[in-house]
Amino acid sequence: MPTSPDSPSPAAPELPDLAVIRAAAERIAPHVHRTPVLRCSALDRLAGARLHFKCEPFQRGGAFKVRGATNAVLSLGEEEARRGVVTHSSGNHGAALALAARTRGIPAWVVMPEDAPRVKREAVAGYGATVVLCEPTAEARAATAERVVGETGAALVHSYDDPRVIAGQGTVALELLAQVARLDAVVVPVGGGGLISGVAIAVAALAPGTRVLGAEPAAADDAARSLAAGRLLPNPPGRVATVADGLKASLAERTFLAVGRHVERVVVVSEEEIVAAMCRVWERMKVIVEPSAAVAVAAVLSGVFAGAEPPEVGVVLSGGNVDLDRLPW
């Protein structure tokens, strides 16, 4: 049984610290973009806060995922790397791992659900990886990836339950904290928890007075429920119905540990709020964000920061890979 995030355990899963995140930043620097931070006065007024948007849609591969994938691939030993890498992903991590593998010149296999957006399947294949389709459930994805590992001998690089990946994602916070002089809070979308874990670890070390909040779809609210209960409460088995396809995964014990230690709360938003937030960012900022990124915007627009003195809030726009033939409005 999983333990409370505050319960010490000799078998506690490994998490990176600030030194490891800084080492990841140095390792991946030649291969990733330092993404900009943008402002929008119209969204500031709607949120009752001064918002600083960390724009990972402008990242290589169109999402933050290339940070963690590149750190993981470049951390492999030569013999292990020659056999290639495997993952299962709804799209962004798969594309990121394919891109990182191409950068190092090694093969990659990406297991994807049959209902993954076309743009994400094409991106994975375009970066040179072999796409293996499976049923659209977490169980089918994991089982198929295990089969591919057995057939190829390649190394499994999990999309979030891997300290190398978490360290790479934490570089988002290193950049954001260097780009904005002071932040009262940072809001991060939550799926499996790799991004928020890395960000929260870095923020806790560098800016301990800054709050870290998660943002999650109501249809996949395992992080909010787990944080409230003090134990892992994964999403029910089977298909998770949310437009935010990148946030369907449940926390792992590793990411639950980081969330429990460093995240103040997780704000849950509806499907209607996600679509409305996505549309507002497109209209007001002229930035294409995917629904998973819009979840963080929906959270800040929900009134969570309403008060007399508008706080300075960092908002991580996690990605912009959208199937234009399947827009949710």
Image: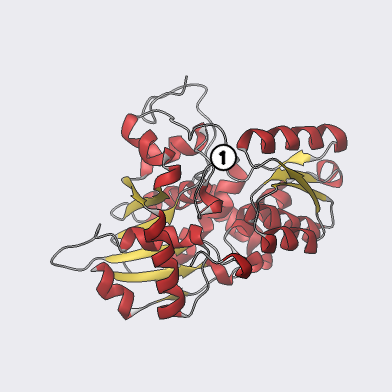
- Residue 233 pos. (x, y %): 43, 30
Query: On screen, 241 above or below 329?
Result: above
From the image, tell me which residue sits under label 1: 239
Confirm whether residue 179 shows in the render: no
For residue 33, what is the image quadrant?
A: bottom right
Label 1 sits on what residue type? Arg
For the point 37% across and 53% down, the residue is 270
Residue 79 visible from this viewpoint: yes
Task: Identify whether 142 is placed above or below 320.
Answer: above
Q: Using the image as rendered, state which of residue 262 and residue 133 is in the foreground.
A: 133
Q: Position of residue 325 (x, y in %)?
A: 63, 68
* Side (left or right) of 65 relative to 203: right
Residue at (42% x, 58% y) in the render: 295
Dot 1 alpha-carbon crowd within 10 angstroms: few under 14, some 14 to 19, many 20 or more: few
- The answer to which of 7 and 142 lies nearer the viewer is 142
Task: Determine the image quadrant of residue 136.
Answer: top right
- Disc 1 element: loop
Q: Position of residue 26 (x, y in %)?
A: 61, 60
Residue at (61, 58) in percent of width and height: 67
Q: How is the image coloured?
A: secondary structure
Seen as rendered, the residue at the extreme top is 1
Whole-percent x, y for residue 39 in the image? 38, 77
Mark count? 1
Residue at left offset 68%, top offset 65%? 31
Query: As rendered, which of 99 and 276 lies closer to the eye?
Result: 276
Q: Nearer the viewer, residue 165 or 42?
A: 42
